[in-house]
Every structure is written in C-alpha cells, then in structure tokens.
Amino acid sequence: MGGHSSFQASHNVFISSHGVYLLVFRLTDFLKDKLETYRLKKCIRMISTFSSVELNAPKLKEHEPPLIFVGTFLDELRKSSTDFKGQVQKIQSSISKFSELSSHKFVRFCPLDNSQGTEPAELRLLYDARSGLQNQPPTLAIDDADANVEQLRKAIIELAKHQDQWGRKLPTRWLKLEMDLLKARERGTKILTLAQVIEMNKLSIAPLADDDEIVLALEYLHCTRSVIYFREFDHVINDPQWLADCFSLLITDDQFLPKDDLVLARDLELYKTKGELTPNLIDSFLCLDQNKAFLPHKSILLALMEKFGLLVRILISEPNTADVCFSEAYTIPSKLLELENINGITDDINYLKKRNLAVSQTLCFIFHDVFVPEELFHRIFATIMRTYRTASLSLRRIEDEPGTDPLTTKDTTHLYRGFGCFEVNDLCRMILSMHWERSTIAVTLFSPSESKLPPDSGPLVRNTLERIIQKTLQMSNQQHFQYTHTLHCNFHLSPYDTPVELYSVIHAKGGMFCKGEECRRKHRLKKSDLLFWGITKVTIHVQGFESSDEATCLNRRATPQELGRLSHMVEASKCQQLFIALGLSLPEISNTEHEARSLAAVTQITRMLLKWTYAYPNQTFRHIEKAMSEVDMATDNLGMTVETGWECVTLDDMDSNEEGLDRQLVVSEIRGLVDNIGKNYFNLFLELGRSVPDIEKCEMDHLGSKRRVETLIKLWIDTFRD
C-alpha cells in the first residue's frame, strides 16, 4: 500500500489483526526528513487499533499483530556516512522510543541493502579504468545484503507464530476453497460473484457442505484479508491488491492527477479544492487504457468505497421529507480542505450569542484508546454527511443575502476536513468538530432563530451520533474502542484546552469552572448542561486509588497550570530520563532546554511538559505517573497537582507578605512586583490563568524580562479586574 497521505485513507480496509506487518522506509529519509517519522507513527497508530485485550473467535490468543521495521537502502547510508553502523543504531534507538509502540509486544528492526536489487544487471561487475580489469564488488557488501535478506526472512517466520491465527483449527475444505480462489487469482480473476464461487465449490475435490458454509468461509477469509467480502454486495474481491489499486486511482494525491486535460479542468478543480469526485471524472479515470479492467465493475467498486466511508454522496434533501435525495457527485472526506483558521467561525458564534440566540455547551466524545487513526474519523464523518444536510453557520450571511437559501444549496464550501455545520431540523443546527490527534469528536448545537433550543434536540443528536460511531466501529472491527463524554465551553478545542469530566460537573457545587485556555475560569459548566444532552447518570470505574475524585482526575489530560505545578516534583537529575520515557526525543529535549536556558530550571521542565502534552494531547496523568515510576521518581503527591477549582498555590523561591493581599492590585504597584518575580514569571502567570500563547506572545514582543513581567501583570489585571 502506498505511503502518500491520500492513499492512507484506504489502509484500514486491508489491515486486520491477523498478520505480520512490515513497515518499510528509507534509512536516509528517516535521518533527514521529519515527515518520515510522522508517517511511520501514523502507520503504527493504524495497526495499533487492533492491539487490544479482545480475543479472537476461538479465544486462542490476544490480537497482537507483530511489526517489523524494514530500513531500506543500507548501501546508500554506507556510502554517505563513515559511521553507518552508528547511524543505523541511532535510527533503531529512535524507533524503539516511539510511544506509539507501547501496545505492541513483538517488534523487530531489520536494515536492508538494496545494492543488488537496484543496480542494473550489467553493472554488477565494476569496471576499473586504471587496470582495464573487471572487478567483483566487495564481497562483504554482497554477503551483508544476502545476510540482511535472510535476517528479514527469519524474522517474518519467527514472528508469524505470534499472530493470532497461528495454531487455529480450521476445516480442511476451507483451506481448499482458499487455494481454489488463489488459483483463480493467478489466472487473472480479480472479482467473482457469490454464484461463481458456489459453482467453483461444486467442482472442488473437497466441496463445502452448502451455501451457508461457503459464506462463513468467505467471511473468515475476509477477516484475514485474503479476500474482501460482504454479504450485502454478493461479490467477492479475489485480489485485495487489485482493489487497493482501484482505490488509489480514485483517491490520490494531486501530484498524480492529469495536468493538461482542459475538458476535465472544472472537475479536477472541484476534486482538489472541495474533495468532490464527479461522475465525469470517475469515467475519465476508468476509461484510460491501463484502467479499463475496473470499468465493468464500477458500480460494485463505488458501493464498496461508500461502505468503507472512503467517499460519500451527501444528503441534500430537507429533513423529514419522504423523498431522500443525495448529491450526484461523491465527496471524499480525506480530501476536504483543512480548516486552518477558526476566527471567522468564532465571530459567527459570538454574533449568535450577541443576538441572544441559543448556543449549547459542547459535548465531546473522547476515545479511551490513545492512538485512534485519523481514518476512523473520516469514516464517521462520511456517515454524518449522509445523515445530516450541510447548512450555513453564518447568520449574518443569511441576513445579508436574502435572495439565497443556503439550506438548499449543493455548495459544500463550508465543509472542511473533519469540520462542518449541519441541519438537525428547522430550529436547530449542529457544529461538528473532529480532533483525531486528540481522539475527540466535539458537537455543539445552536439555533439560527430561537433563544432556546428544543428540549429533545440534545438527546436526539447524541443518540444519532452514538449509533453512527458504533456502526462504524463494527464495520472496522474496532468494537473494542470505548469512549466517554466530557463537556467543553467552546465548539473547537485549542491545543491546551482540557474538556471537563462529567463526574466533576455533577459533584462540584455550583458547577465546574471551564478549562478552556482562553476563557479559563470565566464561567462554569453545570448539571443543566448535562441534562440538555440527556445525560442523567455518569459511571466512573476507579482502580488503585482510595479517593475516587482524585482517581477520576488522574485519568484525564493535565492542564498547563497543573503541568506547571508538576514541574516542582520532577527531579532535575532524572529530567531527561523522564521525558524519554514519555516519548520525547533527545533533540526535542535539548532544543527546549536551549530555548528556555535563560529561565528558571522549573520553567524549562514546564516547557518540556507542554511540548509533550502538545505532541501527545490524549495522554493523561496516568502516563506521567507511569513514566515517573519507570525512572524511580516519587508519585505519592501527584494528586496534589490536580486542579479542583480556584486554588491558592505558593511557588517555590517566591516570598510573599500576606498583609493586604485581600484587595485588588493597582497598576502603580506593578513596578515593585517585577523585581520580586524574576525568572519564575512563566509558571506564575500560568497559575494566574494566562494562556500559554499569551505568555509566549509577550516573550516575542518584549525581549527584556522586566518588560515582559510588567506587561503580563497589566494583562492579568485587565482580564481579571472583577
């Protein structure tokens, strides 16, 4: 399967827990291209979705698909580096520290020499112009190449016994059916109808008993991805690679699209800018000579792509109408443009609130599994686009253009990758914002005309989304994924925002302060916000802690303020070990230390914790606790850093005089405070509620530390004057 970003949307179709996976990458690219690391981690995330405590049908083994990292072109590295063995060791060490590998038990690394396979045959003998003699390449190079290939072969055989189908008992006639299908594939048969498979079975020397057994055998072969088969389609894809080729033909990177076809110019522009795949563009792709084998099977191939959520015909008819209509063109969720700036949408939401129109608090669906692949969110989003009609978010746009009706337009410019506005009914619309890197789906409801939302709108939307999620997980064989609900104060999650646990909302007197980075502590999330979504009971499972409140808090992501407090617990001598255990690389740690070298040591640690939570936004206090334990740091007081509301915290090395502290600070007193704050200003203003972006902007605008502190104090006074 291809490594290009567009191809990755279809990878889940061909991946299961029943196999050994080779992650192939170029060694030299790993050293010079950061995207290579990103691509590898993304592939691990995908395969990790099948690593769980769930057991296969006969309950023989856990789903633990083995991984082999194959670093190719070792010969290139040998030529470019005098210490190529050290470089290989460095790459292996770096991969071993990927936190994404935490759920895998069987992982190997194998460098591979490509010199024999990449050099033309006639160049395998090297010509020496000085002597006029032909010399064999160095024996060591060839032997090393052969040894590496043999090492890889042995690794595959060794790890094969760890994949969960090893040792499973199957009817012999099922294996005979698989062999017959493989022979048909070798003869060029890529796709068969179920009727053709039944006829094939009749001619077998070991036929299956009846049609029902044939279907069961095909479903088993589908689980192992030997074939692709769903009962509802009555077809068997006998060559999954052929199907992958078709998918990559229709869902591809822009660089592979035709450049000079003027007839297709409009269709290609829609494809690149809006992720639309028009019927005209589909036919043009399939009518090319090299693709004509797909053309007779166009309808079943498109149906399969819809089944997998790779593309979708979006709903265009009005809600609750008898005749349901869908768009003629397909929309590819993974090809939609990313929403790069939310300022305009934020302005639209603020305009709604200014007009006293209803806007709900945001309900978040957060998956427990840290590594949830982006492709799962694409498939969920595809079903949502087929279930709800897209709608306009901007009330001002509706008022400014009375001659247009955005509710019936087929234009999808307001759809983005993982983000959209949808019509629930005449009185209610939904903003859906997906944050795959945080394993979170956020949904907010608003009314374009009413000051109150219909009382049943929250439960109606929540139940519909939960049905969509469960159906998608079932289709993907990822039913073991679990999610919880949290509340947030904004339709969008900023990098350091922390949604509030429902347990805290229920048990906090008067509600729980929000933990949005920009609006922190300005308002509370209350029980009424839960009741709007139809949530009347929250079940908390606690293990290992006497206090359920503390245990619940430790199962969530830490806020920047909590990370600032946690910094005081980190032993300086074990700091590097801790962050390596958390998944940061040595260059990342060194760069952060260098950037914060003029600040206090505790601030350097805080900066690294912030870098960690930004890189792994779905990891929690539990991951910190585990990493601290691994490097022999005390974790007894970890719960003391957890925030439960407004708290008074005294930072180390900062003296205070309590007399007169119960009155408001005035601007004239700022200068006297500046000298006393010193290098601890970053952690101080985190604790006082300033956001990380605010502090960093102030650092960029003011090079002098005194000027920075003075400006931050003024900002704090202006923000929290009341």
Image (cartoon, helix red, strand yellow):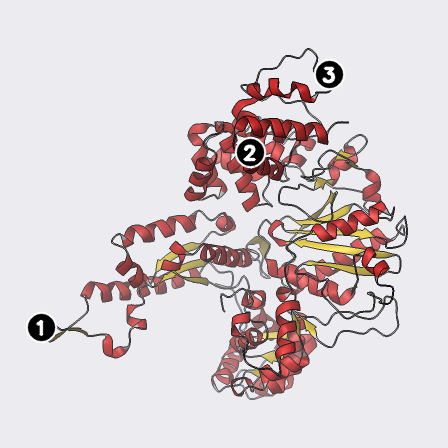
Residue, x 76% and y 42% (percent of image)? 538
> Mark 3 to mark 1: distance in Å?
93 Å
Q: Residue furthest top?
A: 659
Q: Residue furthest left?
A: 131
Q: Which mark is first along the chain, 2 or 3? A: 3
Q: Is residue 681 above or below residue 453?
A: above
Q: Which mark is first along the chain, 1 or 2? A: 1
Q: Residue type at mark 3?
A: Asp
Q: Which residue is mark 1?
A: 131
Residue 64 seen in the figure: no
Q: Residue type at mark 2?
A: His
Residue 566 lies in quadrant: top right
> Mark 3 to mark 2: distance in Å?
30 Å
Residue, x 82% and y 42% (percent of image)? 529
Q: Residue type at mark 1?
A: Ser
Residue 363 seen in the figure: yes
Horizontal and vertical percent position of residue 207 = 57, 83
Q: Which residue is mark 2?
A: 702
Horizontal and vertical percent position of residue 507 = 77, 33
511 left or right of 60? right
600 left or right of 339? left
> Mark 2 to mark 1: distance in Å?
68 Å
495 left or right of 166? right
Horizontal and vertical percent position of residue 120 = 28, 77
Q: Secondary structure at mark 1?
A: loop
Q: Which residue is mark 3?
A: 662
Q: Is residue 84 above or below residue 679?
A: below
